[in-house]
């Protein structure tokens, strides 16, 4: 689990910037699992706090198998949310093989607004181990809250993030 909390460990997740960018650099999991994220409005109490904001999202994937088959672009109906409060999926069946890794980004827009919902969009590229293939996901949606989102948590659905880097950038 990797948590970014405003005011903790030099993290600014407030009105300093209108746009925040999380970069995923060679993320490797300890088990084949899903990489997910969720936001919180609880601030410094978010370490074990409330990561259950309602999310509406869409999830598309472009994939191609190692053997040259199954090239497609598809809407994955089971990986989106319609006012769900679960952690949002960023990568499905992300491989844990020694040579497997995930790279990508998540954009979060105006998280400190107390007027509007909080929009996000993400793109990831990774090795899916269930069927050896490359997956490129496209996720977009919003947190349906007018409270400020001041913490973001990333976690695997099983196992741990073994290695890699999640970097946070504020963009003016």
Image (cartoon, rainbow, N blue to C red):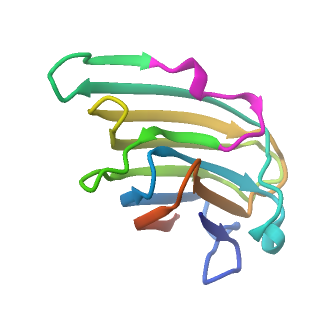
Direction left: furthest residue: 68
Q: Quadrant of residue 79?
A: top right
Q: Quadrant of residue 66?
A: top left
Q: Is residue 145 above or below residue 43?
A: above
Seen at 81% across and 59% down, the residue is 41
- The answer to whether 10 is drawn above or below residue 146 in the figure is below
- The residue nearer to you, when weighing 82 against 93, is 93
Q: Residue at x 68, y 50 (%)?
A: 38
Q: Relative to 102, say whether 168 is above or below.
A: below
Marks counted in the figure total 0
Residue 127 forms part of the magenta stretch: no
Judge left or right: residue 163 versus residue 117. left
Q: Report x, y in % for residue 167.
A: 46, 68
Left/right of residue 144 with respect to residue 169 in the rendered view: right
Q: Position of residue 12 (x, y in %)?
A: 63, 74
Residue sitting at 75 percent across and 70 percent down? 47
Q: Residue 159 appears in which quarter of the rendering?
A: bottom right
Residue for point 83% across, 57% down: 50
Q: x, y (%) of residue 26?
A: 33, 59
Residue range in magenta is: 75-87
Image quarter hosting the N terminus: bottom right
144 lies left or right of 17: right
Q: Is residue 98 left or right of residue 114?
A: left
Residue 53 or residue 66, whichever sits in front: 66
Depth check, front residue: 101 or 33: 33
């Amino acid at each position: 689990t990797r948590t970014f909390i405003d005011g903790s460990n030099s993290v600014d997740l407030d009105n300093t910037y209108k746009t925040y960018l999380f970069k995923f650099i060679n993320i490797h999991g300890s088990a084949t699992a899903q990489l997910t994220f969720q936001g919180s409005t609880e601030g410094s109490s978010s370490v074990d706090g409330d990561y259950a904001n309602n999310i509406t999202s869409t999830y598309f994937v472009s994939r191609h198998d190692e053997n040259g088959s199954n090239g497609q672009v598809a809407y994955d109906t089971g990986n989106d949310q319609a006012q769900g409060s679960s952690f949002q999926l960023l990568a499905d069946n992300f491989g844990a093989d020694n040579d497997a890794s995930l790279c990508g980004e998540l954009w979060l827009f105006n998280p400190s607004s107390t007027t509007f919902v909080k929009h996000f969009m993400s793109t990831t590229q990774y090795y899916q181990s269930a069927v050896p293939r490359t997956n490129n996901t496209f996720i977009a949606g919003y947190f349906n809250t007018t409270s400020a989102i001041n913490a973001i948590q990333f976690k695997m659905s099983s196992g741990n993030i073994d290695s890699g880097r999640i970097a946070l950038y504020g963009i003016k």
